[in-house]
Amino acid sequence: MSFFFQELVNGITTGALYSLIALGFSMVYGVLKLLNFAHGDLYMVGAYIGYFVVQWAGGPAAIKIPVALLLVIMFVLAAVLVGGLGVAMERFAYRPLRDAPRIAPLITAIGVSFFLENAALLLFGGQYRVYNTPEFIKLSSGVQIGSVTIDTVQIMVVVLSVALMAGLRLLVSRTLLGKQMRAVAADREAAEMMGINVNRTIAITFFLGSALAGVAGVMAGLLFNQVTNTIGFIAGLKAFTAAVVGGIGSLTGAMLGGLLIGLAESFVTGYISSTYTNLLVFALLILVMLSRPSGLLGQAQLQKV
Amino acid sequence: MMTAPPPAAPPPAGPQIGADEWVARLAERRVYLPSWLGTAQRAAERVGWWPRLALAGLAGAVLPLAGLGGFQLQVGIDALVIAMLAVGLNVVVGWTGVLDLGYVAYFGIGAYGFALLSSAQLNIHLQAYLSLPAVLVGTWLLGLAIGLTSRRLTGDYLAIVTLFFGEAFVEFTNNVAPSKLGGPNGIVAIDPVKGFGASLNSNTSYYYLLIIVLVLTMSVLRLLENSRTGRAWRAVREDPLAAAAMTIPVNRVRLYAIACGAGVAGLAGAIYAAQQVSVFPTDFDTPILILVYAGLVLGGAGSLAGAAAGALVVMVIYDGLLRNAAESGYLFYGLILLTLLVRLRPWRRLAGVLAATIALGFAAHAIARAISASAVAGGPQSGGWIGSALRDWVIVPANSKIAGNWGFVILVCLLIALVQVDVRTRTILLPPVLWLASFVWEARLVTEPSITRQLMIGAILVVMMIARPQGLLGQRRVESPT
Amino acid sequence: MSDPSVTGTVPVEQPPPVLSLESLSLSFGGLRALSDLDLRVGEREIVSVIGPNGAGKTTVFNVITGVYEPSGGDVRFGGQSIAGKPPHAIARLGVARTFQSLRLFPNMSVLENVMAATYGATKATPWESVLRLPRARREERQARELAGDVLSFFGQRLAGYRWDQPAYSLSYANRRRLEIARALATRPRLLLLDEPAAGMNPAETHEITELIGQLRNARELAILVIEHDMHVVAGVSDRVVALDHGVKIAEGSFDTVADHPSVVEAYLGRDPEALT
C-alpha cells in the first residue's frame, strides 16, 4: 500500500511539472491558435540555465551562496531568459505568419524546435549535464509519512507549481491584462479594434508562457538530475498530451491534464515497467482524443457558416 | 410598406469593352525570366507533363554512367527515397490539406514489413514481386485504418494525434517483441529485391529501381490529380464545408488521400530496407520526418514536381555537400552572396556593404594578430581557394569552440534584430553580421557538420515559411475565409 | 388538385412537396435559433425568405443541407426525411446551395470548381481514372459538357478563356455567378440561394432577378431564396416567408407580407406612441 502512496506522491510531483508546461503551452495556443512545438525546447533551455547557475555558484558539491538564494537565482534567471527567448521567437518566427493558414506556423514551429535542439547540441554538446541535486539540497530533510518519503525537492516543486498556477489564474481572471489576453484569444481583430495593443498582449502572453516553461525546466533538472538537448522533445509531447487531453485553450484543463499524465506515468512505471511508459501515455492520449475530440474540458467549436 | 419598384434598365448584352479584353490578354502580360531562361520556361509550359518527367528521369538515369559512384551513389539513393516520401506526403498535405506529422511511421512500417517478409527474422523469404505489393497494400490499408480512427479530429488535433502515432511506432519497434522485431538492434540481413531468378545487389541497381519507381509513382499521381479524385482532394483542402455541400464525401476523400500517401511511403520503405539490408527503429524517427517536410516546403507543397525537386535538393545538400567540410564552404558563401544579390538593391548599396565587410575583416584580423598570436592561430576550415582567400580575413582562434559558441549566439540574436530594424540600421549592421557569420562558420559550424546540417534544415523550414511559403516551384495560394 | 365531385373517383394523392419543413426546431445550448418552423416549397416554385439579420434564415439553410442537425421536427425532401443525413448525402439527393459569404474553391480554376461538383454523380474509381479506362473517360467528358452547359447559362461572363482562370481572380459578381453555376452542376431539384444579390449594383441585381426566373423555367427547379433586397424578392417570388427570431411571422404573396404589421415591426421597430 505504501508503494501506491509513494507512486502517488511521485505522480503528483511530475504531474505538477507537466501541468506547468502544459499551462504555458495552452496560454500560447489560446491567444495565437498556434501549437508551439518549440515549447518543450524552451523547457530544455531553462534546465540548462539552471545547470549553469549551479556551476557558476561553485558546482553542486561546493555552493558558495546560501541554497535558498541559489534556487531563487536559478528560477528567476531561467524565467526571465527563457521568457525573453520566447518573445524573440514570437517576434521573428510567428508574427509574420499571424494571418497565414494554420499549416504555415505549425511547420515553422517544427523548424524552430529542430533549430533550438541542435543549437543546444552545438553549444553544450551531447553529453548529459548532471545537476547532482542531493549534493546541495539535503533530500533527507523531507517529510516522512510512514514509509512514504516526500523529499524537499518534491515539496518545493509542487508548492511552487501550485503557486504559479494560482497566480496565473488570478492574472487571467482578475487583472486588466488577463482580460486583454482573453479578448485577444476570443477575437483578435475585434480586440484590436477595441483599442487593445494586440502585439504587446501576445508578447506578454508568450513571455509568461515561456517563463513558466523555463521554471519547469529548472524543476526538471532538480527532480530528474539529467539534462540534455533532447529532453525538450519528450516533455513537449507530454505537455501537448496534457493540454490537449484537458481541452486545449482551457487553463484548468491543462492543469488537470498534466496531473493525469503525471499520475499515469508514475503508476505505469511503478506497476508495469518503465519500458512501456511512453507507449502507454501515447496510447492514453490517442484514446482520449478519439473518444472526446475536444479534450475533457474543451468545448467543441461551432463553425459559423 | 413597399411596392414593387419599376424594373431597372437591363444590362447590355455581351462582354464590356475593355474589361474582358484586359483579362483575355492576360497571357501576354505574364512575366517570364529573362533571355534563354524565359524561352525555356515558355517551352516547358507548352509541353505536357510527361515529357518533362521523362526528361528528368533520363537525366537522373544518366548520372551513374557519367561517373557518379560510391558514396555519391548512396546519396543519390537516399535522395530518391526522400523524394518518394515527399511526393507521397504531398498528396496528404499539399493536395488534401491534412497535416500528418506521423507520416514517417508509414515509411517505417513499410520497411519493417518488408524486413519481416523477406529476411531470416521470421524465416519468410518472399520474393520481391510478392513482398513489395504486399507491403504497398498493407501500408495502404493501415493508413486507411489510422485515418478511420482519427476521422472525427480536425486540423490541430489531428496533427497532434498523428505525431503521437509516429512516436508510438518508434517506441513500439524499440520495445515490443524484441525477438521478432529486433528491439533497438533492429532487423538485419534483409534479402535484396529479387525475383524471377535475378536479384538486385549493387547500389547502381537500386538507384535505377528507385528512379523507375519514382517516375511511375509521380505519373500515377499526376493522372489522379487531373481526375475526379484529384479535384475532390483539392476541393477538400480549399473548403471542406463547401465541398460537402457539393456532393463530395469529405471524410472518405481524406481517408483515401491518407491511405495513398501511406502506401507510397510504405513502398519507399520496403525498397529502402532492401537496399540498406537492415532496419533500426531510429531510422524512422522525427529527424527523417523533418527532412521530408523540409523538402516538401522548399519545393512547394501542392506541386508534385516541387515535392520531388525540393526533396532532392535538400537531401543532396544534407547528405552530400555537408559531409565534406571543405566543399560546403562553397555552398555557404554562395548562398549568402546569392541572397545579397537578390535582396540588396540598389547595386551601390550592395557594393558598399561588400566593401565594408571585406575591409572590416582585414582590419579586425590585423588588429587581432597584433594583440595576440593565438587569437588567429587556427585557420579557416574551408578547403580550396576559399580557405586561402579567407586566411587573413576571418579570425579563427586556436581554441575556437568557446569563441565560436558565443559568436553563434550573438549571430542569432543579431539576425533576429536585423529583421526588425529599419533599412538604414540594417545596412550598417550588415557588414559586421556578415563577417561574424563567416567567423562562426569557420570557427565552429564547419567542425560539426552533422549538427550544422540539422540547423540548416530547421532554418530552411522557418525561413521558407516566412519568406516564400509556396516554395520554389509552388503557386501562391489564396485562402478561403473560414 | 382533383375534385372528386368531377371525376367521381378517389382523389389522386398529391405528389409530396419538394421541400417540407415540419415543426422544425434548432437550439444551440440555451439559444433557440429556430422554433417550430413550417415551410413548404413545391415543384417549380420560388419561395423567398426574408427577415432582419439574426432571424435564422441562413440557419434554416444550414439545417436543410445537413450542417446542423435539428433539435426537433423534421426536414422532408420529396417526401423523404433527410434530417440527420450528412451534407454530401443530402447534396446527392438533389439539394444544392450557395453561401452568404461566398465559398468557392479559390485556387482551383473556374472549370475545376464546377467539375468538382459532379463528384457525386460520377462513379469511376481512382484506378479507372489513372488508367483512363472507358468509363472514366466518358464520365470526364460528360462532366466537362455539363460544366460547359451550366457555365453557358451566364452568357459571355464565364465563357471561354475564363475557364482556366483561378476562381480568386474573378470579379465579385462573377464569383457569385460561379457559385450558382457550381451549385447547378450537382443537378439539383431544389436550389437554395443565400443572398444571391448581396453586394451587387442595380444592373447586376436586375440580371440576377431575371436569372432566378430563368433557372426555374429552364431547369425545372424549386428555388428557396434568402434576400434582403426587396427588388429581387418582389421580382422573383411566388411566395414570401418572413422570419424573426427563428419564428415564422408572416407568409403569403409579396404584397401581403410586405404590409403585414409584424413584418413592419420586425424591420422598422414599433412606434412607441402608436396604440397597439
Image (cartoon, rainbow, N blue to C red):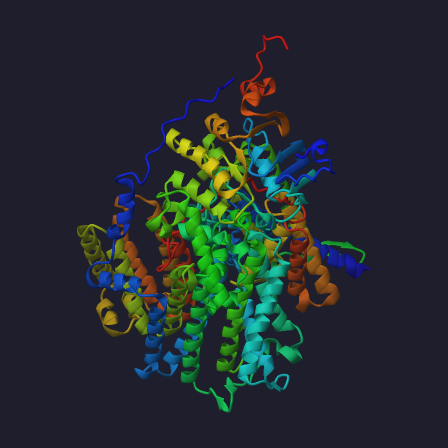
Residue B257 in the image, given as x and y percentages of width and height: 53, 61
Please state, as top left, top right, bottom left or bottom right, where the N terminus of chain A lies in the image: bottom right
With respect to residue B369, does B129 lie above or below? below
Which residue is at the front of the view, B146 or B467? B146
Which residue is at the front of the view, B109 or B325? B109
Count of numbered labels shown in the rendering: 0
Q: Residue at image x 62%, y 84%?
A: B121
Q: Is residue A98 left or right of residue B344?
A: right
Q: In this view, does C270 lie to the left or right of C231?
A: right
Q: In this view, does C199 lie to the left or right of A27?
A: left
Tell me if I can see residue A121 in this picture: no
Q: Residue at image x 42%, y 84%?
A: B205
Which residue is at the front of the view, B219 or A244? B219
Residue A115 picture quarter: bottom left
Tell me if I can see residue C12 in this picture: yes
Residue B61 picture quarter: bottom left
With respect to residue B459, does B329 lie above or below? below
Q: Outermost residue, bottom direction? A: B197
With respect to residue C83, does B156 lie above or below? below
Please state, as top left, top right, bottom left or bottom right, where the C terminus of chain A lies in the image: top right
Which residue is at the front of the view, B431 or A300? A300
Residue A20 in the image, given as x and y percentages of width and height: 61, 49
Q: Residue at image x 44%, y 37%?
A: C211
Residue C186 in the image, given as x and y percentages of width and height: 52, 49
Residue C256 in the image, given as x and y percentages of width and height: 57, 21
Residue A139 picture quarter: bottom right
